[in-house]
């Protein structure tokens, strides 16, 4: 997203219980969330239905991704294509359990450092050529090659032995902790024991790409269906710039006999109202983004609103590296000046839980959410104007005097636009400062965010894997996902401890210490905890979405 950009549609707390990695291919019950909380029970994703007619569907996406290379992008707008066209060593099933993907089984050494994966027999690429453990070796080495510009490179360098050194050019492929023992056996050696490493492997940065097609076509390999070789349940058979991506069943997928959908068209419609019109007219089968002003009506009409729990937070980045936002008091003033409840009730218009930290609730240890009982850091559901003005005055700007015009930027999205406009008015009125709002296409907007060319920007996070460690790197000094440029050595040290801690309860304690530290520094501007909602007609069943927002279509039935 990634960085994971959020379309800022819905919010809600997630009740999910996570377990540490196991030492075999037995499914890990990482989520006790029900498969769907659709408002119309006849549209439940897991309901069995008899296929009728062509097994084809069209689903609308409201943002164009910055690319479709799993080794490069971390943009959540690409996830719908990536998770349906590629499959890594592990994947998620309908229950939210982590199960074998390309790997049929795996073993973990007694010291927790060496993972040995046993690949399934007869794996093939979508072009029919053989697929082996060496393809994983190549793909991980490619991510660790600086010229690849992998946006999730830290998810590899932070865990695998000598990965950072390989990236820096001080270690060779022989030194790297990724080896093909034979065609069907892959060995990965870690820097230190990491109880949640199997969860990390579910991220698409670990998906394999075909060496031959990448080397023959360079970066253009993802630009044409002829060269877009993949290994998942679907393959790309059509692409039209800024219009659609067409997927069809991959007959060479190892589990092709259980892929029920023959054709899936992802259509790009950037205007949510236009997308809704296409949905209500029956032109398309589903849309990922529901216009906030229509949400209540659609739910009341039982028009196919699907709501899934999500482990994520809608927040706005504050550039902590530039004045005056490098002052925690200024950041505190901004956080205090926002009326979260008004945004939820009047702008987003759904049930939601106001957020006071970047770390979402939803991770439980021994049956208790680790965020239970935490501080609200002086924030509240409604704006505290007096406290906000006091913090700004303490920062040296009494009544907003001398404060430079705040630049509030966002990516083009109907709902995000409404949120930004409301926030701009709140900041102006409550802090007596000037605010300028600007927007751009996602690709340009996100590049500016990554380069630090912003002051306050629309952003957010849905966990890439179901563990709070998916959140902590967002504010770790030097991490590639830290686009707020917050830096605190004490926080960094705590995150390092969490990464190496094998005791789940202790790791949770350290996690909350780190989150508490950054939240007290007002490292970002939290708005609300999110859930995922989309629209799907009731003749479509069998899809499922994980708490990390991945939407799977391989078992869809059109009835």
Image (cartoon, helix red, strand yellow):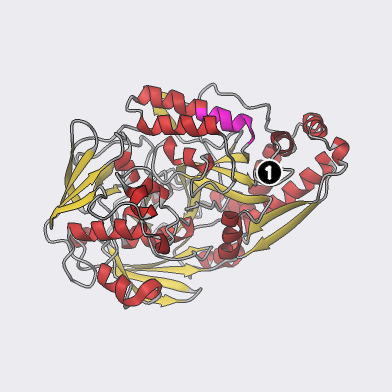
Relative horizontal placement of residue 280, taking residue 41 as reference (left or right) = right
**Residue 46 appears anywhere in the view:** no
- The answer to which image quadrant residue 36 occupies is top left
At x 68%, y 30%, the residue is 380
Q: Split into 4 quadrants, where in the image is the C terminus?
A: bottom left
* Magenta-highlighted residues: 514-522
- The answer to which image quadrant residue 115 occupies is top left
**Residue 408 appears anywhere in the view:** yes
Query: Of 343 and 434, which appears nearest the observer?
Result: 434
As for residue 516 lying within the magenta part, the answer is: yes
Query: Of 255 and 453, which appears nearest the observer?
Result: 453
Query: Of 455 and 288, which appears nearest the observer?
Result: 455
Residue 535 point in image, percent of width and height: 49, 56
As for residue 197 lying within the magenta part, the answer is: no
At x 83%, y 43%, the residue is 429
Residue 345 point in image, percent of width and height: 67, 42
Crowd band around label 1 with a 10 angstrom C-alpha radius: few (<14), some (14–19), many (20+): many
Residue 70 point in image, percent of width and height: 37, 60
Q: Secondary structure at mark 1?
A: helix
Residue 456 point in image, percent of width and height: 68, 49
Is the residue 459 above or below the residue 398 in the image? below
Residue labelled with disc 1: 343
Q: Residue furthest front?
A: 170
At x 85%, y 42%, the residue is 432
Main SS of the magenta part reads helix
At x 54%, y 49%, the residue is 299
Is the residue 101 above or below the residue 506 in the image? below
Q: How many marks?
A: 1
């Amino acid at each position: 997203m990634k960085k994971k950009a959020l379309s800022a549609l819905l919010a809600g707390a997630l009740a999910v219980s996570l377990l540490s990695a196991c030492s075999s291919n037995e499914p890990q019950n990482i989520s006790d969330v029900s498969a769907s909380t659709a408002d119309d029970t006849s549209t439940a994703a897991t309901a069995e239905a008899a296929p009728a007619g062509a097994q084809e569907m069209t689903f609308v996406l409201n943002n164009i991704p910055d690319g479709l290379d799993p080794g490069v992008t971390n943009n959540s707008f690409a996830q719908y294509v990536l998770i349906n066209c590629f499959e890594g060593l592990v994947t998620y099933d309908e229950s939210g359990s982590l199960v074998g993907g390309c790997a049929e089984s795996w073993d973990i050494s007694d010291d927790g450092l060496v993972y040995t994966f046993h690949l399934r027999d007869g794996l093939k690429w979508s072009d029919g050529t053989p697929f082996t453990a060496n393809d994983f070796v190549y793909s991980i080495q490619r991510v660790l090659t600086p010229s690849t510009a992998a946006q999730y490179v830290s998810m590899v360098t932070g865990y695998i032995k000598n990965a950072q050194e390989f990236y820096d050019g001080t270690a060779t492929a022989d030194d790297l902790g990724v080896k093909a023992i034979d065609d069907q056996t892959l060995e990965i050696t870690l820097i230190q024991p990491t109880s949640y490493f199997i969860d990390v492997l579910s991220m698409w940065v670990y998906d394999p790409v075909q060496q031959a097609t990448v080397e023959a076509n360079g970066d253009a390999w993802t630009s044409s269906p002829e060269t877009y070789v993949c290994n998942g349940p679907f393959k790309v058979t059509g692409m039209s710039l800024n219009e659609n991506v067409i997927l069809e069943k991959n007959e060479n997928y190892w589990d092709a006999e259980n892929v029920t959908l023959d054709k899936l068209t992802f259509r790009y419609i950037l205007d949510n109202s236009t997308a809704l019109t296409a949905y209500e007219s029956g032109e398309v089968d589903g849309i990922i983004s529901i216009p906030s002003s229509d949400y209540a009506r659609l739910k009341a009409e039982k028009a196919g609103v699907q709501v899934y729990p999500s482990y994520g937070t809608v927040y706005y980045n504050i550039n902590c590296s530039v004045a005056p936002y490098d002052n925690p008091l200024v950041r505190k003033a901004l956080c205090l000046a926002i009326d979260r409840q008004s945004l939820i009730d009047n702008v987003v218009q759904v049930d939601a839980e106001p957020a006071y930290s970047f770390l979402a609730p939803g991770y439980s240890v021994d049956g208790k959410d680790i965020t239970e009982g935490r501080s609200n850091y002086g924030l509240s559901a409604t704006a505290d104007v007096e406290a906000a003005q006091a913090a700004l005055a303490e920062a040296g700007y009494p009544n907003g005097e001398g404060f430079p015009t705040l630049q509030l930027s966002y990516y083009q999205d109907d709902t995000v636009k409404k949120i930004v406009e409301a926030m701009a008015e709140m900041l102006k009125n409550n802090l007596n400062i000037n605010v300028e709002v600007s927007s751009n296409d996602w690709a340009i907007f996100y590049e500016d965010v990554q380069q630090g060319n912003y002051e306050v920007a629309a952003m957010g996070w849905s966990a890439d894997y179901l563990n709070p460690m998916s959140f902590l790197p967002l504010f770790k000094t030097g991490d590639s996902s830290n686009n707020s440029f917050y830096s605190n050595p004490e926080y960094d040290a705590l995150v390092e401890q969490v990464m190496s801690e094998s005791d789940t309860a202790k790791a949770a304690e350290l996690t909350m210490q780190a989150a508490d530290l950054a939240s007290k520094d007002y490292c970002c501007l939290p708005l609300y905890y999110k859930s995922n909602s989309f629209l799907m007609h009731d003749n479509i069943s069998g899809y499922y979405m994980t708490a990390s927002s991945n939407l799977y279509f391989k078992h869809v039935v059109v009835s």
